Image (cartoon, rainbow, N blue to C red):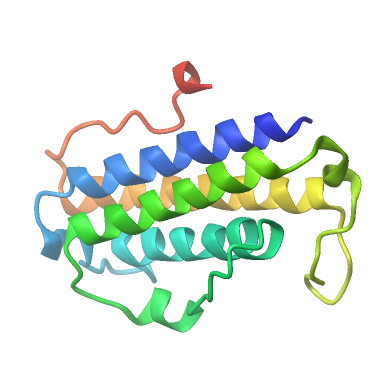
Amino acid sequence: MHKDDFRVVMLRDLRAVAREVSLYPSDDALWATMPGLANSGGTLALHLAGNLQHFVGGVLGGSGYVRDREAEFATRGRARSEVVAELERAQRAVERTFDALSEARLGDEFPVELAGRRIVTSRVLLHLATHLTYHLGQIDYHRRLVAPESGVAGTVALAEL
């Protein structure tokens, strides 16, 4: 895979998460919890924004981003527009990092240990992209449960590749 493969998928799916968040009919609906689902759409969206700003922007891109993972899961009640703004910050972090990233760096070890070991950067990026898409699907499902009439987000659109 090339660096642009990771970039295109991550940016596509971040845009889709932002569309999902915008389709919730209210700020309260974004934070609604459902039986059997541990996280709201808002929680998952903030988690994704923080995850990518940390691992792609901060660790790989050297942006200096400081992650507060606990806050990603503890925050409630933020406006949809604020959550979308956080997703847009994540998009900019992905763009800046991939603009500066060399193809050769994909074969290097990721700058930090993960799960107690060193992993090649391309494999970490693949994990981050699939993690993003996994939670995007959860957000789509949550939104349709909370607000069945909220429309279609165009999640995982092939046309955006």
Q: Quadrant of the N terminus?
A: top right
Query: Which is nearer the eye, 149 or 41?
Result: 41
Residue 125, given in percent of the width and then of the height, sits at: 71, 48
Taking 3 as reference, is 103 left or right?
right
**Which residue occupies 43% across, 45% down?**
137
Taking 59 as reference, is 1 left or right?
right
Residue 39, given in percent of the width and then of the height, sits at: 37, 68
Residue 87 in view: yes
Taking 55 as reference, is 22 left or right?
left
| Res 57 quadrant in image | bottom right
Query: Which is nearer the eye, 134 or 74?
Result: 74
In the rendered image, the residue lying farthest to the top is: 159
Residue 54, given in percent of the width and then of the height, sits at: 58, 66
Residue 141, given in percent of the width and then of the height, sits at: 34, 47
| Res 44 quadrant in image | bottom left
How many numbered badges does the structure rendering display? 0
Residue 135 higher or lower than 8, as above or below: below
**Which residue occupies 49% across, 38% down?**
11
Query: Which is nearer the eye, 130 or 68?
Result: 68
Residue 41 higher or lower than 94, as above or below: below
**Which residue occupies 63% across, 62% down?**
55
| Res 148 quadrant in image | top left
Query: Which is nearer the eye, 141 or 161?
Result: 161
**Which residue occupies 55% across, 41% down?**
10
Q: Quadrant of the C terminus?
A: top right
Residue 134 in view: no
